Image (cartoon, rainbow, N blue to C red):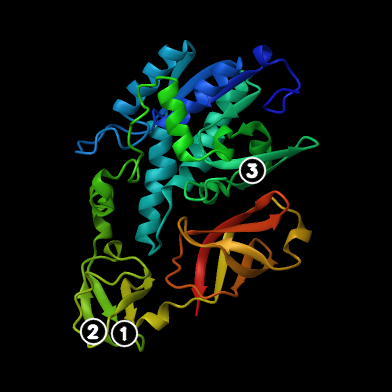
Amino acid sequence: MNSLGINKAKKDTKVVVAMSGGVDSSVVAAIMREEGYDVSGITLKLYDTAKTSKAGRQCCAGQDILDAKRVADKLNINHQILYYQKKFRVEVIDSFIDSYASGETPIPCVQCNQTVKFRDLFEHAKNLKADALVTGHYVSRLQTNGHANMYRAKDKKRDQSYFLFNTSQDQLDYLRFPLGEIDKLETRSLAKKLELNVADKPDSQDICFVPNGDYSSVIKKFSPQSFKSGNILDIDGNMIGKHEGIINYTIGQRKGIRISSDEALYVVKINAKNNTIVVGKKEFLNIKNIKLRELNILGSKNDFDELINIKVRSTGRLLKAKIKFSNKFANVEILDQETGISPGQACVFYKKDDHGDKILGGGWIDETFN
């Protein structure tokens, strides 16, 4: 059994590394090559490079593809570019726009992992007869008797398990995450030691297809009809102002509401059906129950018989919760205090065991209740 848990000699084990052109995936490719595996790198071109001053800080286009190619050449491994722009437009960008237009706050990184990366790239790697698809995500994977479980990464500041909750068991059995047990500083150190050209390259900061974080400009470009003016209401349903499109607002937002009040007002609800924004005092952001749709369950039913932990935002803390399943939905009772939970975000399930915080799956937030 080799270091990837595959019953083959390393030289006979074919692995495909998803290479974004960043330091993490480049180090993973180098590690696999150093260990003696039969390595191929694949880079996805997902969108056409935007004119932005932050060149090199976004993935899957332009300079990043060139960086991935340079790393592959240095490592002397095969490298292939897959042109997935049409898939990405339909599966990720259009979904992102539709979600905002319906009053939600989407997470395109989860959609990207769920579709073009862990579905289409997964199938491509299988067609290449690869034994594993290896990525630079910071998440841990533990395999027991041929069954893989996913855990939060050692480096909690870099942990990306929230973005991978929709990974299927079939995919998880095939995937490998070599960076799950090291921290980011060690990754940078390895990149310098291996003399990779991306050793000091900054991490991606914004959503890859959203230049400078200005998501409203992207929506205006693809869906200008989304910017329809409407009413701003108070908690009692009284009209207290006008807005220039629900696209411009997110749950918990305080700045930019432009309503005069003695107390700070926050966006507490977005109603796409009647094109209204509801604002209120901070106390109205407290959420105790959420309804989830489109569930992906990795754990067993027994895992949910007692309290578990959940995350309702990527940078959020773990919250104690009770889960009840009903048909294709789940109802979550949050036992800790949390505010500003938005439909369209993910709720990810965790349960602590001897190995750490195991990911049990999760679902998309459909509705929230005070």
Which sits earlier in the primary sequence, circle 2 or circle 1?
A: 1
Query: Residue flagged by tag 3: what amino acid is it?
Result: Ser
**Residue 65: x percent and y percent?**
35, 24
Left of 162 or right of it: where is 81? left
Which residue is painted at 34% across and 83% down in the image?
Answer: 281
Nearest the camera: 130 or 6? 6
Q: Which residue is mark 2?
A: 240
Which sits earlier in the primary sequence, circle 1 or circle 3?
A: 3
Quarter of the rendering containing residue 22: top left
Q: Which mark, by number, is residue 234?
A: 1
Mark 1 → mark 3, Cα distance in angstroms: 42 Å
Q: Is residue 178 above or below residue 313?
A: above
Which residue is painted at 47% across and 46% down in the image?
Answer: 158
**Residue 231: x percent and y percent?**
25, 77
Q: Which mark, by number, is residue 148?
A: none
Q: Secondary structure at mark 2?
A: strand
Mark 2 → mark 1, Cα distance in angstroms: 7 Å
Q: Secondary structure at mark 1?
A: loop
Q: Is residue 204 above or below residue 25?
A: below
Query: Residue flagged by tag 1: what amino acid is it?
Result: Asp
Q: Is residue 177 above or below residue 236?
A: above
Q: Which residue is mark 3?
A: 168
**Residue 194: x percent and y percent?**
44, 20
Which residue is painted at 57% across and 68% down in the image?
Answer: 291
Give neighbour class at mark 1: few <14, some 14-19, many 20+ (Cα, 10 Å): some
Left of 214 or right of it: where is 9? right
Mark 2 → mark 3, Cα distance in angstroms: 46 Å
